[in-house]
Image: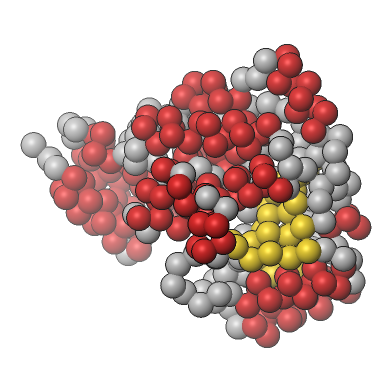
Amino acid sequence: MPDKANFDETLADIRRLLAQKDFVSAQDRLARLSAEEDQHLMGEVTALGLPRRLHSAYLRLAKAKGDAVAKAGYQFLLVPPPEIFAPYGRFSPDERRAIAQKNREAVPRLIHQIWIGNRQVPPATDAWRQHAEANGYVYRLWREADLEAEGIDADPIFRRMLEDGDYPGAVDVARYFILSRVGGIYLDCDFYPARDDISFADILPMVGLTAFAEETPRLTGQGSVLLANSFIATPPGHPVFERILQALPEIAERLPRAPAWWGTGPLIFSVVARAGSVTLAGADFVAALLADRADFSVVEEARAEASAKGDGLLIAWKSW
């Protein structure tokens, strides 16, 4: 009878075969793996009915073969069955009125970023600090001590993720607390300002809840648009964040091995936020997507191009 180690080894072998472009052998291994018992060891079931890691392996095969149709289908369905998350996106009429009212309120001129762990703070944080000062915003970088002072470290989901070294998941949880309590603009630390001559209020209405859409559509149960939670603008006290924070413990219990983008990140954010209205940032809001650890000269080139073309406000650049 297979165990998790066997599945891990087989999936690693499939990745090696794909790297060698041996698609026939990879397909054969996937077919045999799909017939194995105890498939729960490969993660929770997706909307396609496959264990998540097996589903991901089929997606890698489609990408490696250049099969655009299969790739699109596997990406769209690489989510849990929509009925699992559906209850979190249901609000009563009174709650919907509260959401509508909150969406008429102004977003405070605050920019938040969070950095936890022992790695050096990314240079983007200082760039956003300077951007904020130049454009009349208050900037705050939240570290572990700041989150502790706010009592966020007492949240069991945040604490568990921190103990497990799941920093992306922990930062997901922390951003919801911060935005719920004080509102403002949250930005992941892998965004760099594309320009400093304009800022958020120049291109966004700065009222209610604002986000931008991920490029890949997903079966969310609330439409096919997956909202990124890497940028969020909101007034304080928005019901969306209270609902997400209430949902996290139950999601962690029902889907204990779910990736952060399911359980704490864009998926749960999308399901809850799409229950009300959301302003979408313009299609060019992210002006450039740079390779991880690209040289800073590439960032400077992207900034110059964005300024010349009048494009967006964010450059996606993971400096670490």
The number of discs equals: 0
Q: Is residue 292 visible?
A: yes
Q: Position of residue 230 (x, y in %)?
A: 63, 53
What residue is at 87 percent from the left and 66 percent from the top? Answer: 136
* Residue at the (65%, 19%) spot, across then down: 91
Q: Is residue 100 left or right of residue 252?
A: right
Q: Going by the image, does 220 lie left or right of 47?
A: right
The residue that appears at 77% across and 57% down in the rendered structure is 110
Q: Quadrant of the N terminus?
A: top left
Residue at screen point 28% across, 41% down: 42
Frontmost residue, 15 versus 113: 113
Position of residue 211 relative to residue 121, above or below, is: above
Residue 319 image offset from top left, x and y in percent: 57, 75
Q: Is residue 259 above or below residue 1?
A: below
Asked where in the image residue 156 lies, by quadrant, the reply is top left
Looking at the image, is 120 positioned above or below residue 11? Answer: below
